[in-house]
Amino acid sequence: MYVCRWNDNAAVTIASTYHTHFPVKTVKRYSKAEKKHVDITEPNIRQYNKYMGGVDVMDKVLSSYRPNFR
């Protein structure tokens, strides 16, 4: 189980049994402290987000068939 927290515009926490943090990519972000763009390393968030849309669609479809428990 891989759990990752990425702080960009908002904090994002992901948990996956398939993805890992590799490959690590370098991205540019603006640093308020340095007042310029700096390179930082980003875990493998892009691949996770690419396929996350399908999971959201499946959850929406399955919600119609789930019984309501009280």
Image (cartoon, rainbow, N blue to C red):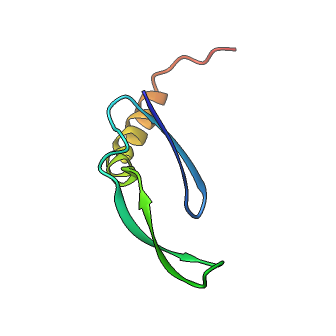
Q: Position of residue 8 (x, y in %)?
A: 55, 61
Q: Is residue 5 above or below residue 18?
A: below
Residue positioned 48% across, 76% down in the render: 38
39 or 46, nearer to the observer: 39
Query: Quadrant of the rendered structure where residue 30 is?
Result: bottom right
Residue positioned 34% across, 59% down in the render: 25
Q: Is residue 33 above or below residue 66?
A: below
Residue positioned 32% across, 50% down in the render: 47
Residue sitting farthest toward the front: 34
Residue positioned 38% across, 38% down in the render: 55
Residue sitting farthest toward the right: 70
Q: Is residue 47 above or below residue 69?
A: below
54 or 61, nearer to the observer: 54
60 or 56, nearer to the observer: 56
Q: Is residue 27 left or right of residue 37?
A: left
Q: Position of residue 63 (x, y in %)?
A: 49, 29
Q: Position of residue 49 (x, y in %)?
A: 38, 50
